[in-house]
Image: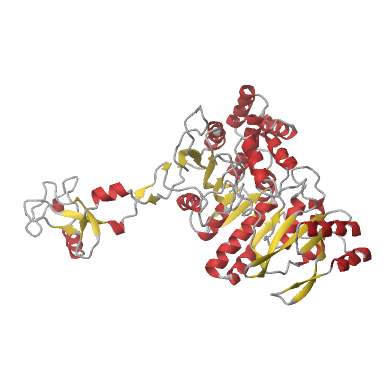
Amino acid sequence: MSGKLFYGDNLDVLRRKIASASVDLCYIDPPFNSKRNYFQIYNNQGGEDRAQAQAFVDTWEWGDEAESGLAYILDIERLTGDGSGVRWTEQTVELIRGLTKVLNRGSLLAYLVHMTLRIVEIHRVLKPTGSFYLHCDPTASHYLKLVLDAVFCGQGGDYRNELIWKRKAGRGETNNEAVRFGVSHDIILFYVKSKDTVLKRQHRANSAAYLEAKFTHYDENGRRYRLDNLTSPSYRANLVYEYKGYQPPAKGWAVSRETMERMDSEGRVHFPKSKDMRLQRKRFLDELEGETVDSLWDDISPINSQAQERLGYPTQKPEALLERIIKASSNEGDTILDAYCGCGTTVAVAQRLNRNWIGIDITYQSISLILKRMEDSITKTHGAERWREVEAEILLDGVPRDLASAVALANRKDDKTRKEFEKWAVLTYTRNQARINEKKGADAGIDGIAYFLIDKDTNGKAIFQVKSGASNRATLATLNSDRLREKADFGFLITMDLPSKAMRDEIAAAGKYKHPMLNREDDRLQVITVAEILRGDRLDLPMARSDAVKSAAAHAADDRQIGLI
């Protein structure tokens, strides 16, 4: 299957790079409107300093971005389309106009403007038979449903379900004095672009109580079964016949004589001891699909600390949740979109279920994690050669491919994106094995850390510093001091320029490291240029896995949503 990973703002990507009517299913788990929660994930995630965490929080404060988004929505001339293929329904415009009066210009309205701009683009890229699932929590789901009604139902679409995912057992509030009932679920709003869109019914395991009450019989081979009625609900003459001395019901049997004989030969008919009693059908447990899935999903557990698929990503959703959605609303070969793909659960499940997929995320750390997650899964299941084949088919868009695009990324100056160049450089050079430093401001110039194997029982340590501007001998001298302080074996400086003569002298003065497993000597200080990374040069050490996200386990105050998925 083909895959596309877009690194950038999902609104820009949706508008410029995703064709209209090209997606069969879109699932998103966007950030919830909680300032505390945003700060929590970006402080614990790794690679983000306090200033950047606060900058991300400020997305939900009313500002220029929200004001321009509101003006765009309220431009009445856009009702019939603005050349992008998006049609702004009158319901959408009037809804946002009304909410502006009700909510005033604040964080909640900023959040709804952000979501509305993206929901109309998602509607545009969906095929006429496309389905949309929006994962949210109860704090803003009622507002989001109004937006979805305006966008989808205002253009011939249909609201199908409010799905309840019970992700933990209700235990009430943990404060000394409870102020509300415990929150134990998320909401998934399910919409379709056309009322003709069908759903493939899903099944779940039957409850133990149901099995114990109903499946009380075993045949001679030990197969468990229950008895079911064989009486026809309406009279049909050809169904009225005697069978092996058992008289038919007044309306006849539920099956024809030929079918009855076939069922009998297969051991699917129960013959009571008394011929005055009715024949019954045997329903074997091992042939049942299970209980039909309804709108309460209480059979899928969240990611816990022992889960094999756990990445340490605070809001990671279980693959079983996405598997149910993808199987219900798509077929093999269809295209699945996740516009907030985070740690890549949607992408991973779509790949496994033989769907084409599109993922979008605004941080390179997520792009890196998704690639590493897929590499691990495919390599484990199908081998390294298969991963190389899949990797070659993945389109990476927005990731630097040449020096000009790397310089453009490095020159971003706003707080939200200023670390993205550092992330790209460190994670790309280490094949996504390093972790981005979590303590910017107190990092003393350390942008990333990676661990490598010295022997089967011992790890070595390498630190990384990234400079987008000029570097000199003093830069390397400081890096070497940091290396010694951190007891690291290597210090890597990633920079735009080749090292000067003075820098090469500093490298020589730092000495060599002899790796016992590789039987070779390497400079303890090394300068890696961006051009070399773009050429394909990578860190050549036996790595001890320490992923950026895996090393940053969540320390959430509670189990509520705390950021991007």
Nearest the viewer among 74 and 469 is: 469
Establish if 368 lies above or below 155.
below
Residue at 81%, 60% (x, y): give it: 493
Residue at 46%, 53% (x, y): give it: 327
Residue 558 point in image, percent of width and height: 55, 39
Nearest the viewer among 490 and 95 is: 490
Residue at 67%, 34% (x, y): give it: 60
Nearest the viewer among 158 and 560 is: 560
Residue at 39%, 46% (x, y): give it: 293
Q: To which quarter of the image does residue 537 belong?
A: bottom right
Residue 226 point in image, percent of width and height: 22, 53
The N terminus, quarter of image = bottom right
Visible in this render: residue 495? no
- Hey, which residue is sitting farthest right in the picture? 501
- Total numbered labels placed on residues in the image: 0
Horizontal side, residue 430 vs residue 291: left or right: right
Visible in this render: residue 326? yes
Horizontal side, residue 56 vs residue 293: left or right: right
Residue 77 point in image, percent of width and height: 68, 32
Establish if 148 lies above or below 535.
above
- Hey, which residue is sitting farthest top in the picture? 101
Establish if 16 lies above or below 93.
below
Q: To which quarter of the image does residue 406 belong?
A: bottom right
Residue 289 point in image, percent of width and height: 34, 54
Horizontal side, residue 524 vs residue 470: left or right: left
Horizontal side, residue 317 vs residue 248: left or right: right
Nearest the viewer among 261 and 310 is: 310
